[in-house]
Image (cartoon, rainbow, N blue to C red):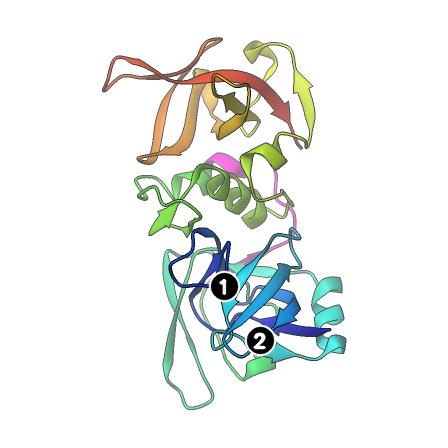
């Protein structure tokens, strides 16, 4: 078994070993992983944070020893809190990194960072404020940054920046936490899940005060939430059908 860490700002995680394959997620700077299958051009990896698997270009990561991989697993992680920042490599070249990048293992490949960071668990009251950092970010299937993010990526990153661990996809996140019977029982920071006509969970958002929700749909936006689902004032219709509300923390 070999191990790796992302030393670039963003690396696409693909469903198959091809640049033409679907991007199922992204690996951000500093995230570490196991290399399950390694070839000359592609590596099948499993992320340490959420066990998510996919293929990455074999040129787009730095190797870790097993000892350093285990050390990262046991460490308290710290994350970039600004929209865009820069690390510097061993030659003082700038490396652009984004909100949510993991700084915990930055020294393993000789980089330095002097910007703002956060670590540890925060109060659930911080979740909404963190979510607002992504407001108006364009929707991107598999995205995890303010320059492109999907609905479950938004939820995972907001919770991650506040010290909580969620799985990657909406259908996986729907298996976490405790269900609530009514919207009136929910608090800001709880999660609302939405399904399609086949009953499959296809969307998730973070509940805000006064029956509003922030979610990624076209862009990260704020809409009204009621017992039927999400009501979009711009189109004057419901965009998503509510399935369940979950309290995760």
Which part of the image, by quadrant, shows the N terminus? bottom right
Residue found 30% across the figure and 43% down from its top = 138
| Location of mark 1 (residue) | 17
Residue 180 counted in the magenta span: no
Q: Nearer the viewer, residue 38 or 248?
A: 38
How far across and how far down the image is residue 221, in percent?
Answer: 34, 32
- Badge 2: how crowded within 10 Å, few (<14), some, or many (20+)? few
| Location of mark 2 (residue) | 39
State which tag comes first along the sequence, 1 or 2.
1
How far across and how far down the image is residue 161, in percent?
Answer: 55, 49
Which part of the image, by quadrant, shows the C terminus? top right
Identity of the residue furthest to the left in this view: 234
Q: Considering the numbered disc 1 on the image, is that residue within a helix, a strand or a loop?
A: loop
Spatial separation of the CA atoms under disc 1 and disc 2: 10 Å
Report the side of 139 relative to 38 (left or right): left
Q: Considering the numbered disc 2 on the image, is that residue within a helix, a strand or a loop?
A: loop
Q: Is residue 94 above or below residue 48?
A: below
Q: Dots 1 and 2: beta carbons under 8 Å?
A: yes
Residue found 44% across the figure and 48% down from its top = 142
Q: Nearer the viewer, residue 207 or 154?
A: 154
Report the side of 191 relative to 23 (left or right): right
Residue 120 counted in the magenta span: yes
């Amino acid at each position: 078994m070999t191990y790796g860490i992302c030393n670039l700002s963003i690396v696409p995680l693909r469903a198959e070993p091809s640049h033409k394959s679907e991007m199922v997620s992204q690996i951000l700077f500093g995230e570490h992983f196991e290399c399950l299958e390694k070839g000359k051009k592609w590596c099948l990896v499993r992320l340490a944070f959420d066990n998510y698997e996919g293929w990455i270009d074999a040129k787009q990561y730095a190797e870790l020893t097993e000892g350093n991989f285990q050390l990262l697993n046991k460490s308290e992680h710290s994350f970039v809190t600004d929209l865009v920042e820069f690390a510097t490599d061993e030659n003082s070249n700038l490396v652009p990194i984004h909100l949510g990048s993991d700084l915990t293992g930055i020294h393993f490949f000789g980089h330095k960072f002097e910007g703002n960071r956060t670590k540890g668990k925060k109060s659930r009251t911080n979740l909404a404020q963190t979510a607002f950092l992504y407001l108006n970010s364009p929707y991107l299937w598999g995205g995890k940054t303010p320059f492109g993010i999907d609905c479950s990526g938004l939820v995972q990153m907001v919770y991650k920046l506040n010290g909580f661990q969620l799985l990657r996809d909406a259908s996986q996140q729907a298996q976490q936490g405790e269900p609530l019977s009514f919207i009136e029982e929910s608090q800001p920071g709880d999660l609302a899940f939405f399904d399609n006509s086949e009953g499959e969970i296809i969307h998730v958002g973070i509940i805000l005060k006064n029956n509003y929700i922030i979610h990624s749909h076209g862009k990260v936006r704020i809409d009204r939430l009621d017992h039927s689902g999400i009501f979009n004032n711009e189109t004057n219709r419901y965009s998503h059908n509510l399935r369940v509300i979950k309290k995760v923390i």
